[in-house]
Amino acid sequence: MTFRIRKAVFPVAGLGTRFLPATKTVPKEMLPVVDKPLIQYAVDEAIEAGCDTLVFVTNRYKHSVADYFDKAYELEQKLEKSGKSELLSLIRDVLPRHVRAVFVTQAEALGLGHAVLCARPVVGDEPFAVLLPDDLIWNTGHGALRQMAELAERESASVIAVQDVPREQTGSYGIVATRDFSGRHGEISAIVEKPKPEVAPSNLAVVGRYVLSGGIFDRLAKTRPGAGGEIQLTDGIAALMEKERVLAYRFEGRRFDCGSRIGLVEATMQFALDHEDLAEPTREFMRAALAR
Ligand code: G1P
């Protein structure tokens, strides 16, 4: 089996309660970091990794995600007429021409594993990526998913992004135990969803980037509700590991947890520093704000 990925799944059906009242009408994936919504960063990362089919798993409250990737006829015409070609390419380039977006609905919020299973009719049984847009990964080199895609191809195995977290935080993540870590990757020997620190097999936490073999779908179809009463992707992966190798990969880059308010604030500052026109004013503001 070749492990080249062409399809990326974006589960975007969560409620985003940590950002209420903003998320009363704006899905959390549409919250901006500087001038792009979170979902756009994840989409760009998937395209850089070679994906040309993007599968958004949404619910009935998330029309704005589909609207965002749709053509904005009136706005485009207006900008075209007034010769604003730079702005025009900004809104046209949200998706390059060779990339297509597919939307599937998750009718009930039954968990991340269930959301991924909803993408099965589009993905089929080939290897694919899953990106959780609220994990925003900043990088100066290749994106995290591209690094993972290369490893998956080289090793012909599923790959899951991990990072070390303080032990007291294991209850917020999927946690893995690994055999032989060499360089940045190692084979996963156990994976548990949100274990308490006392029983966590390590402090190596799953970050929202996965390259998975199509075999995961059969496992997810049989997965019963687990942690939090939800059908967990983690449990599907644990079942997959009985038959196939799954690797943990410590990616290069810095992850911002934009599912939390402080994560979104930190990411905004980090990404502002990458914009030529914003870097200096941002630095100046931070210095002055800290001196007050
Ligand atoms: C999900 C996964 C968890 C993973 C985390 C990464 O949890 O279930 O295994 O560690 O994403 O962000 P959530 O944050 O959606 O509760």
Image (tube, helix red, strand yellow):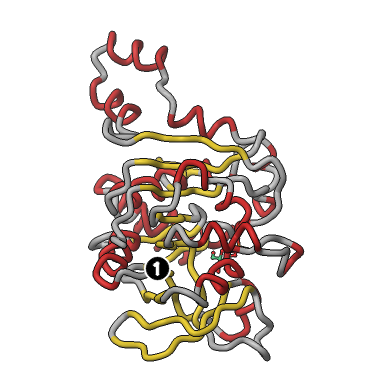
Please give left or right for residue 17 compared with residue 38 in the image: right
Q: Nearer the viewer, residue 69 or 263?
A: 69
Q: Name the secondary structure under disc 1.
A: strand
The residue lying at 62 percent from left, 45 percent from top is 13
Q: Where is residue 95, by image quadrant?
A: top left
- Residue where numbered disc 1 is placed: 158
Please give left or right for residue 229 compared with residue 63 in the image: right
* Residue 289 in sight from this viewpoint: no
Q: Where is residue 3, by image quadrant?
A: bottom left
Q: Given the current orientation, which residue lies at the most extreme right position?
A: 229
Residue 54: image x %, image y %?
41, 42
Residue 58: image x %, image y %?
59, 40
The residue type indicated by label 1 comes to Ser
* Residue 127 in sight from this viewpoint: yes
Crowd tier of the residue under label 1, counting other residues whose Cα lies within 10 Å: few below 14, some 14–19, many 20 or above: many
Q: Nearer the viewer, residue 65 or 182?
A: 182
Residue 181: image x %, image y %?
36, 88
Q: Relative to 98, does residue 113 appear above or below in the rendering?
A: below
The residue lying at 62 percent from left, 57 percent from top is 221
Q: Nearer the viewer, residue 247 or 206?
A: 247
Q: Given the current orientation, which residue lies at the most extreme top position?
A: 81
Q: Relative to 99, does residue 206 appear above or below in the rendering?
A: below
Q: Relative to 74, does residue 259 appear above or below in the rendering?
A: below
Q: Quadrant of ligand 1?
A: bottom right
The residue lying at 46 percent from left, 55 percent from top is 131
